Image (tube, grey):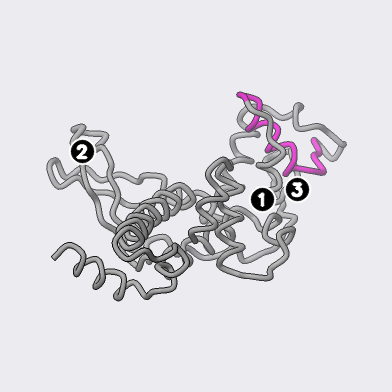
Amino acid sequence: MLRVWEEGQSCPPWARALLLLEAAAPGTDRAVLTRLPVGERDARLVELRAGLFGETLSSLAECPACGERLELTFSIADLRLPAPTASAPYRFQRGAVAACFRLPDSADFEALPVGPQAPRVLLEACVSDVTCDGAPAALGDLTEADIAALVAQMAETDPRADLKAAMTCPHCRHAWSARFDIVGFLWEELGAWVRRLLAEVHVLARSYGWREDDVLALSPWRRRYYIGLVRS
């Protein structure tokens, strides 16, 4: 995890997700991980987080009703959603408009341009075989309502790709659903863990003259015990 955190410092979120998955499943072909639908990718990251830091999560949020800054706690179980029951390609139908689509993966995000055109480029990469009244059509021929319905169906096909946590404000009792970014959340937690670990390395290396590898080879309990001796 220390190596993953170091390698991922200059990486975009999709690349950090792949680094985490590679660490969780050593030997897995990176191309296979890259082509995992985002929902499946994030579901695996949820399980990785549970294995690393436990089943309970704490997060800061702002109540949209009263503006109160809150520290909220919820469970990993709230993020375990069912996988799609069918496999790609999926079928979209709205009136005379039909299309096939697949779910986006990390390769799609790697190829995205920077700017407001990114959502459209992502949609074009995932949608194929568009027809209108049975005749071949392009995504640009669809109305805004058609596009909105298509995007909504893609989201419904695999809700794991857009994780949400149920929130309730203890001050005004307002309830809402907030998007949960498992990649960003896990990366922040990993960073906090790395900084604590490196601080322990610093204390023990300075006190005993040990190399970093020597300190890292110790169990967490033994590191804490030695630090306790140093500070006593």
Residue drawn at x 41%, y 45% is 179
Identify the mark nearer the N-term, 2 or 1. 2
The amino acid on which the numbered mark 3 sits, given as a three-letter code, is: Cys
Q: Do callouts 1 and 3 mark residues in contact (Cβ within 8 Å)?
A: no
Q: Which mark is residue 230?
A: none
Q: CA distance from mark 2 to mark 1?
A: 34 Å
Point out the stretch of residues depicted in magenta.
Answer: 115-132
- Please name the residue that numbered disc 2 is placed on: 69
Q: Position of residue 13 (x, y in %)?
A: 55, 44
Identify the mark nearer the N-term, 2 or 3. 2
Question: Magenta span has 128?
Answer: yes
Camera-nearest residue between 213 and 156: 213
Q: CA distance from mark 1 to mark 3?
A: 16 Å
Residue 34 placement: quadrant: bottom right
Dot 1, crowdedness within 10 Å: few (<14), some or many (≥20)?
A: many
Dot 2, crowdedness within 10 Å: few (<14), some or many (≥20)?
A: few
- Please name the residue that numbered disc 1 is placed on: 105
Residue drawn at x 66%, y 58% is 36
Horizontal side of 213 relative to 143 (left or right) equals left
Q: CA distance from mark 2 to mark 3?
A: 43 Å
Give SS at disc 1.
loop
Give SS at disc 3.
strand
Q: Position of residue 219 (x, y in %)?
A: 37, 75
